[in-house]
Amino acid sequence: MISLPEGLAEFVARAGWGDATIEPLPGDASFRRYFRLLRGGDSAMLMHAPPPHEDPAPFLHVAHWLNAGGMRAPAILAAEPEAGWVLTEDFGNDRMRDWLDAHPGEERTAYEAAVEALAALHRLPPGPFAPYDLAVYQREAALLTEWWCPAQGLTVDAEGYTAAWAEVLAPVLARQNPGVTVLRDYHAENIMLLGGKAGAPQGLIDFQDALVGHPAYDLVSLLQDARRDVDVALETAMLVHYAHHAGGAGEDFLADYATLGAQRNAKIVGIFTRLDRRDGKPRYLAMIPRVWAALERDLAHPALASVAEWFDANIPADLRAANGAFAA
């Protein structure tokens, strides 16, 4: 029997859903838990994001901003953020990742809709969020040297790593002003197909870490997905599709796309290793080879020369050939 968090029944009652049936839902890599409330033909989603590990206030802040701008974040039905409770509109079960598993022939249509939703977001003025600045980029990239490298038994030049990233990120930072809202985790597991079909409106979830940064970042998140294979040909086609809907995406944009792809993929390799070593969640290790393969493609871009040189000098060829995988 699955135990329910303390205080759940009381919050649900205060929200007017005290007579609902409660169904626990699978969790993610965080401390958040999710439940579906069912009452007759109605349903709602309950998120428990308890302090001190979680804070739902940023989720609420971003959700209100997105909905005010015409995007489709879930409507907020009730909230007690100090206790970690948020009750929202239920977007249903048609998550883009699962829907495409069942409808692989609709992949291009689904990705076109996801790219168009991102272009619509980028046409809005940047939101009232903190900047995606060099300190954040560096802190994220450093997760690779802080977690993956030690787990692989490597002693590396951490200072050289930081210096290389500072060099390649400088032009990105210069070109990302005034910036756009960056959701930071925009991929097929965080997009809901509200109409239950490939071209349906995109319901957005898991956006609480939004910052103001470069428009290429969420494209990388979508098209170099850590959890789902995206063919390189489809990735290229979707970059062209984005350019059609959001304006030019010339050589500078593609250079920034590769740089942010490398930065994000280095971060994810570190995060997935940390989820295993610190949090006891080894299932994420199986995704590292997919992420590393994308990282290697990004490193081949001339804009990444100094970071690529660091990888050549610090990461053994056999580990790179194995796409960063851990020995069985």
Image (spheres, grey):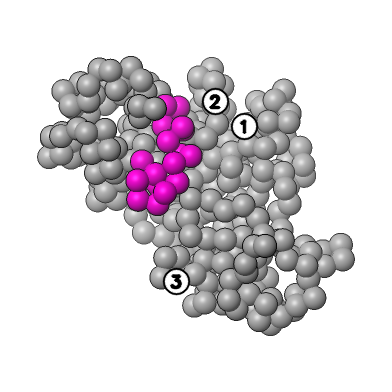
Mark closest to the chain's N terminus, 2 or 1: 1
Magenta-highlighted residues: 273-292
* Separation of residues labelled 2 and 3 (CA atoms): 36 Å
Q: Which residue is mark 1?
A: 111
Mark 3 falls on what kind of element?
loop
Most common SS among magenta residues: helix
Q: Is residue 321 visible?
A: yes
Q: Residue at x 28, y 18 (%)?
A: 318
Q: Residue at x 86, y 62 (%)?
A: 41
Residue 205 left/right relative to 320: right
Q: Are marks 2 and 1 in contact (CB under 8 Å)?
A: yes
Magenta run includes residue 290: yes
Mark closest to the chain's N terminus, 2 or 3: 3
Q: Which residue is mark 3?
A: 51
Pinpoint residue 325: horizontal percent, then vertical percent.
Answer: 37, 27
Q: Residues within 10 Å of mark 3 (few under 14, many from 20)?
A: some
Pinpoint residue 291: horizontal percent, then vertical percent.
Answer: 42, 30
Q: Amino acid at mark 1?
A: Tyr
Residue 229 left/right relative to 109: left
- In what quadrant of the picture does the C terminus appear? top left
- When the figure is inspected, residue 47 is found, relative to residue 311, above or below; the finding is below
Q: Which residue is mark 2?
A: 230
